[in-house]
Image (spheres, rainbow, N blue to C red):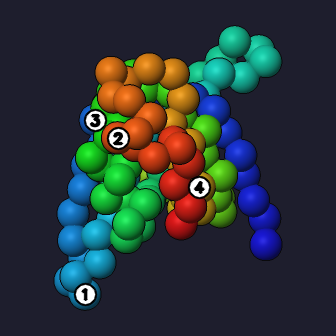
Amino acid sequence: MLELQLIGNLGKDPEGRYTQEGVFVCTFPVAVSTRKDETVWVEVSAWRELGERCHQYLAKGRQVFVRGVPAVEAYTRKNGEAGAALKVTAQTVQFLGSSGKTESETGNGELPF
């Protein structure tokens, strides 16, 4: 299984929802800087308890370390051109930087899947 590790900042507040089967999923975009000073956007999905904690504690601008399984999704842009999106299903999300919450409120900051 291929695994991806990334560090970046949330581009907007996480969005949470329940699937038709009643499973909670939280999604959020993470901006990752490359060595060429470019920004790559990665759409992260966190499921179940991990997703609930991400939804509760993360916010736009917060820095995170994400370890998970990558996938590339092809799509067609509005102008008809082909595009692709990098998506990651998180196995671990570690909260980095400051959020104003104490570590006792968030545990040790690392949330296993």
In this rendering, does residue 79 appear at all? Answer: no
Q: Where is mark 2, residue-wise?
A: 105
Front-most of 40 and 105? Answer: 105
Q: Position of residue 9 (x, y in %)?
A: 49, 27
Q: Find the distance from the CA under tag 4 to the CA under tag 1.
A: 23 Å
Q: Is there a contact, CB below 8 Å, between mark 2 and mark 1?
A: no
Amino acid type, callout 3: Asp
> In the figure, is residue 74 to the left or right of 38?
left
Mark 4 / mark 1, whichever is N-terminal: 1
As drawn, the label of residue 13 is: 3
In this rendering, does residue 21 appear at all? Answer: yes
Q: Where is mark 4, residue-wise?
A: 92
Amino acid type, callout 2: Glu
- The structure residue drawn at horizontal position 37% and vertical position 24%, both measured from the top left corner, is 99
Mark 2 / mark 3, whichever is N-terminal: 3
Neighbor class of circle 3 (other Cα within 10 Å; few <14, some 14-19, many 20+) is some
Label 2, secondary structure: give it.
helix
User: Does 89 sit above or below residue 9?
Assistant: below
